[in-house]
Image (cartoon, helix red, strand yellow):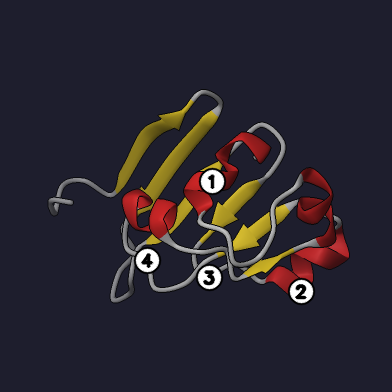
Amino acid sequence: MSSETLVRVKRVSNGVVGVEVELPNSPPLVILVGRRAFVACGFLNVELAEKLGIPCARVTGVRSVEDVLEKEVQQVTSKAKELGVIEGVKVREVLDKL
């Protein structure tokens, strides 16, 4: 992203939007948001999301929406598992579950 662009939003698929947020002195915050759940970068605290009953998953080592799509899900909450999001599967393969 250019120095003038702080947030980039992309339509990933029907019902899923990807967001990249540039942060100062930090890797970007990257998240894919669906109608029922979301997948976020390593900034996501999965333990807290579990306590709050939020359906979400976490990937690490990403800098863009495209990176997230190619990564395998590393952690999921029980609510996300109920939707069919499972660890070890590429995010691209679970977009319809979000």
| Amino acid, disc 1 | Glu
Classify mark 2: residues with Cα within 10 Å, few (<14), some (14-19) or many (20+). few
Q: Earlier in the sequence, mark 2 or mark 4?
A: 2
**Image position of 10 (left or right of 86):** left
Which is nearer the eye, 11 or 22?
Answer: 11
Q: CA distance from mark 2 to mark 3?
A: 12 Å
The correct choice, above or below, for 52 with respect to 32 in the image is: below
Q: Amino acid at mark 2?
A: Glu
Residue 28, above or below 17: below
Label of residue 93 in the image: 1
The quarter of the displayed image where residue 58 is located? bottom right
Q: Which residue in the protein does label 3 denote?
A: 43
Q: Is residue 45 above or below residue 78?
A: below
Residue holding disc 4:
62
- First in sequence: mark 4 or mark 1? 4
Label placed on residue 47: 2
Q: Amino acid at mark 4?
A: Val
Label pair 1/3, CB-CB below 8 angstroms: no
Looking at the rendered image, the disc whose residue lies closer to the viewer, 2 or 4, is 4
Point 66% across, 71% down: residue = 45
State yes or no: discs 2 and 4 in contact (Cβ < 8 Å). no
